[in-house]
Image (cartoon, helix red, strand yellow):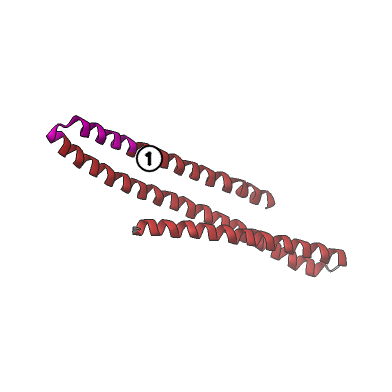
Amino acid sequence: MSTMEKHLFNLKFAAKELQRSSKKCDKEEKAEKLKVKKAIQKGNMEVARIHAENAIRQKNQSVNFLRMSARVDAVAARVQTAVTMNQVTKSMAGVVKGMDATLKSMNLEKISGLMDKFERQFETLDVQTAQMEDTMSSTTTLTTPQVIHALALQ
C-alpha cells in the first residue's frame, strides 16, 4: 500500500469519526432540550436557560463536525483522484512499452490484445471518475441541507 493510499484511508476514517461525533452531539442536544422542557414545567427558568445554552452549544458543535467532515471528504476525493491517476499512468506506461515491443515485431494479435488492454484501462478510469463524481455530489447533497437547517435555526 503506497503512502498516498494510507493517507486516503486515514482521511476517510477521520471523516467517519467526525460524522459520528456530529451524531453524538445531536443526541446530546436532544437530551438537553428534554431537560429544558422538564425545567420549564417545574418553573425553574434559570436551570432551563442553562440547558438551553447547552443545547445550542451542542447543535453548533454538531454543525461544525459536519462541516469539517465535508471538507475532509473533499480532500479525500482529491487524494483518491490522484491515486487513481497515478495507477492509470503506470498502467499506460506499461502498455506503451508493450506496444513499442509489439510494433517492432508487427504481430497483429499482440497489437490487438494490447489495444484491448489499453481500452479497458480507460474504461476503468471512466468508472472510477464517475464514482468520485457521485461521491462528491452526494457529499455536497448531504451537507447542504444541514447548512440550510443551521441557518434556519439562527
Stretch in magenta: 103-120
What secondary structure is the magenta-colored segment mainly?
A: helix
Q: Residue at x 15, y 39 (%)?
A: 101
Q: In the rendered image of this protein, does residue 28 appear above or below residue 73?
A: below
Q: Based on the displayed image, in which of its 4 quarters is residue 117 positioned?
A: top left
- Residue placed most toward the observer, 93 or 51: 93
Q: Residue 115's spot in the image, x, y percent? A: 26, 33
How many numbered circles are shown? 1
Answer above or below: position of 121 versus 70.
above
Magenta span includes 140: no
Question: Residue 128: x and y, percent?
Answer: 41, 42
* Residue shown at the point (15%, 34%) measured from the top left: 103
SS state under label 1: helix
Q: Relative to residue 23, is residue 77 depicted above or below?
A: above
Q: Amino acid at mark 1?
A: Thr
The image shows residue 71 at horizontal and vertical percentages of 49, 53
135 sits left or right of 51 in the view: left
Residue at screen point 64% across, 62% down: 24
Find residue 91 and report its image quarter. top left
Q: Nearer the viewer, residue 114 or 66?
A: 114
Left or right of 2? Residue 108 is left
Image side of residue 50 versus residue 135, left or right: right
Characterize the local packing of mark 1: few (<14), some (14-19) or many (20 or more) Cα atoms within 10 angstroms: few
Please identify the quadrant where the N terminus is shown.
bottom left
Q: Residue at the left extreme? A: 104
Which residue reaches farthest right? 42
Q: Position of residue 86 (x, y in %)?
A: 31, 48
Q: Which residue carries the number 1 mark?
A: 124
Horizontal relation, residue 154 to residue 40: left or right: left
